[in-house]
Image (spheres, helix red, strand yellow):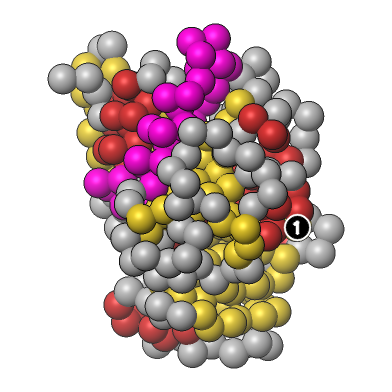
Amino acid sequence: MTGQQTHRGTIHLEDAEIIAHTAHPGEQFVLTVRAPECARTATAGSFAHIRCDADIPMRRPLSIMAADPVSGHVEFLYKIVGRGLQALSRQPAGARLSILGPIGNGFQTTADKPRKLMVGGGVGVPPMLFLAAQLAAGDALDKQDSLVLMGSEVPVPFPVQASALAANGLDAGATHGLSELEDLGMPSRLASLQGYPGVYKGYVTELARQWLATLSTAQRAATEMFACGPEPMLAAAAQVAREFNVDCQLCLEEFMACAVGGCAGCTVPVYGPEGTAMKRVCVDGPVFAAEAIYPPD
């Protein structure tokens, strides 16, 4: 079955109203739109293809950070990269955007692995926040024994506080997390090379390695890992997961034109028992098993 057939009837084209659009340091923006059909079926790891401006026909893919099927609101976090997102950043509240979504296969969680390690870097943070919120609302998660790690070289555009929730084994400099996750009872920590107060000075995958190193073999067997971010971070996350024999899923970021499987412009090699196949990030992914993207040498 092709990707187009698999997703037939699940991707919606909507004329979405901008509810809020706020600027943050580091040319970051949080965009909230009303897109009820997208909000109804969005899952962590899925994305939307957005027309940024009437004069720019090529859409831009943005990971979904939150979706509320009751209000119909969908939230995105993006950083200006190129002409399209620069144009999007100028769109005011009340304006309307053409949105195609939700697109792609999201993260698949396993009920018998209640420990979750979520690792996001840069614009890979939004899927982790969506996943954390989805998991916190369910009953297949041990929140106190799970962890959300976020890396960013610009200040995160969310309230941050010294965490009251334990995250054993981490560097003493990693003391702060997101207030939103704190309210959910979900431990979180931040990493950056910039030396921000309360933030681990280093790579976010180093924090992941520190935390996994504290777990017993049985605890690791009950752990699964999820990651989204730039390619070097994903490669490092896959290596960390392999080092500790932990199942891991990666959400890929890739340039794409149509985002619905027609142009095959976002294909990546995916490795399996029967050899290598070229898969489309948009409809075959964007989430793949880590070993399928970064197989053992």
Which quadrant would residue 37 be assigned to in this image?
bottom right
Horizontal placement of 257 versus 286: left or right? left
| The C terminus, quarter of image | top left
Residue 258 lies in the magenta-colored region: no
Which quadrant would residue 76 be assigned to in this image?
bottom right
Q: Nearer the viewer, residue 9 or 272?
A: 272
Q: Does 126 sit above or below residue 7?
A: below
Name which residue lies at 47% across and 39% down. 170
Q: Is residue 242 visible?
A: yes
Task: Give SS at disc 1.
Answer: strand
Q: How many marks?
A: 1
Which quadrant would residue 239 be assigned to in this image?
top left
Horizontal placement of 19 versus 268: left or right? right
Q: Nearer the viewer, residue 66 or 50?
A: 66
Q: Which residues are magenta?
A: 204-233
Q: Nearer the viewer, residue 39 or 252?
A: 252
Q: Is residue 281 visible?
A: no
Residue 266 in the image, given as x and y percentages of width and height: 29, 49
| The N terminus, quarter of image | top left
Name which residue lies at 36% across and 41% down. 205
Residue topped by disc 1: 68
Q: Does 57 sit above or below residue 178?
A: below
Q: Main secondary structure of the magenta part?
A: helix
Q: Nearer the viewer, residue 147 or 64?
A: 147
Residue 219 lies in the magenta-colored region: yes
Q: Identify the amino acid type marked 1.
A: Asp
Q: Does 282 sit above or below residue 147?
A: below
Name which residue lies at 48% across and 10% down. 217
